[in-house]
Amino acid sequence: MAQPPSGTIAPVDDIHWPSLIAAVSAISAVGIAIGLGLPLLSIIMEKRGISSTMIGLNSAMAGLASMAVAPFTTKVAHRYGIANTMLWAVLLSALSALGFYYIENFLMWFPLRVVFHGAITVLFVLSEFWINATAPPKRRGLVLGIYGTVLSLGFAAGPLLFSILGSDGILPFAVGAGVILLAAIPIFLARNESPDLDAKPELHFMRYVFLVPTATAAVFIFGAVESGGLSLFPIFGTRAGFTESEAALLLTVMGLGNVIFQIPLGMLSDRMKDRRNLLALMTVIGLIGALCLPLLQHSWWLMAVVLLFWGGCVSGLYTVGLSHLGSRLTGADLAAANAAFIFSYAVGTVAGPQAIGAAMDVTGNDGFAWSIAGFFGLYVALSVFRLVFNPKRT
């Protein structure tokens, strides 16, 4: 089958496989690098006697780096091209990953974090733009469901690699860098088919954060609930009376929900005239599920069932929100909006753990559920407002 020219979208019913493979490879590297790197670096810092406060501050550089780099990604890609920019990001992220092994000065880990997560953010933004720009409109949800599933699998594979490789020696760093470098192969092979950015975005970056608010708000909620939930659910679970292993298994069940519901929800979104309705439904389910958590502390099995579907709804906010974004915008505007999408996600990953942790300190263990319900409630309120007072599909 002849491929569409560079910079165009795929035929209505055809999945553009070279672009899909290139974008999926990039996001696989992102997921594995983050999933392996976060626990690896934290354990090494703890072994070196770094305080928990400084470990947390160093880890927070990930979200701050994403927030700093995302607004400039589209401009750089406009100047140097999508594929070329992604290839440089692959190289920088791989080199900085190795840098954590060779550079022992803890203070130098702060700029290393900025380089590593900044480069990862570039891959994040441009892979999403690439796949959104080339996805067939009638199958966009399916394609992004595949994309989201691979991202979730990457996040799961990272900790698995860490459990196998451990934290000693250069091996875990070399494996992480190697996985990232492998993503360069399909990107290079598909470089002539990457979408063009012939024009610069017309609006200021922050305008894109609010241009399609139901999409950017959805990924903000996803970032807040996912990062806060993963960080603090083990504490909530053990305080509720579960053992550490039982709490860990519950997190695994939630992660399983993240994986298995991405493609079905993406396909469902393809059949809907207005994806905002599906986003609103998922947040209502998320709200109800969060409110049920304190009531299910007596039963591990009931908690597991709720978390399975709850995890699917949380991850669906990302997939369907990204699909909604791609259905509304094209070209440079879509690229800038994708950057705003990742920016909103990064803000959520910074805000979520802080808000949920503070709620648990102030109101006790149930504050975990109440604060997460609060995040979902904010989105439900936004959805009602947009659907009632602004019926345009934004």
Image (tube, rainbow, N blue to C red):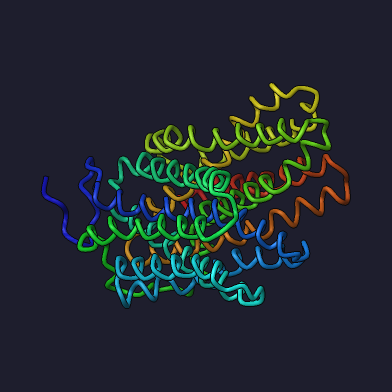
Residue drawn at the location 30% of the way across and 46% of the way down? 137
- Is 18 on the left-hand or right-hand side of 310? left
Residue 142 lies in what quarter of the image? top left
Position of the N terminus by quadrant = top left
Residue drawn at the location 30% of the way across and 49% of the way down? 21
Task: Between residue 277 and residue 94, name the one nearer to us.
Answer: 94
- Is 317 on the left-hand or right-hand side of 373? left
Viewer can see residue 317: no
Residue 102 lies in what quarter of the image? bottom right
Task: In the displayed orientation, state which residue is furthest to the left.
Answer: 2
Task: Between residue 41 and residue 300, name the one nearer to us.
Answer: 41
Measured along the vertical axis of the image, is residue 107 above or below residue 116? below
Residue drawn at the location 48% of the way across and 48% of the way down? 321
Measured along the vertical axis of the image, is residue 376 above or below residue 248? below
Viewer can see residue 323: yes
Q: Measured from the top left, where is residue 88 in percent x and y?
A: 36, 71
Task: In the displayed orientation, state which residue is furthest to the front.
Answer: 169
Q: Measured from the top left, where is residue 371 in percent x and y?
A: 76, 46
Q: Measured from the top left, where is residue 229 in percent x and y?
A: 68, 45
Residue drawn at the location 65% of the way across and 52% of the way down? 224
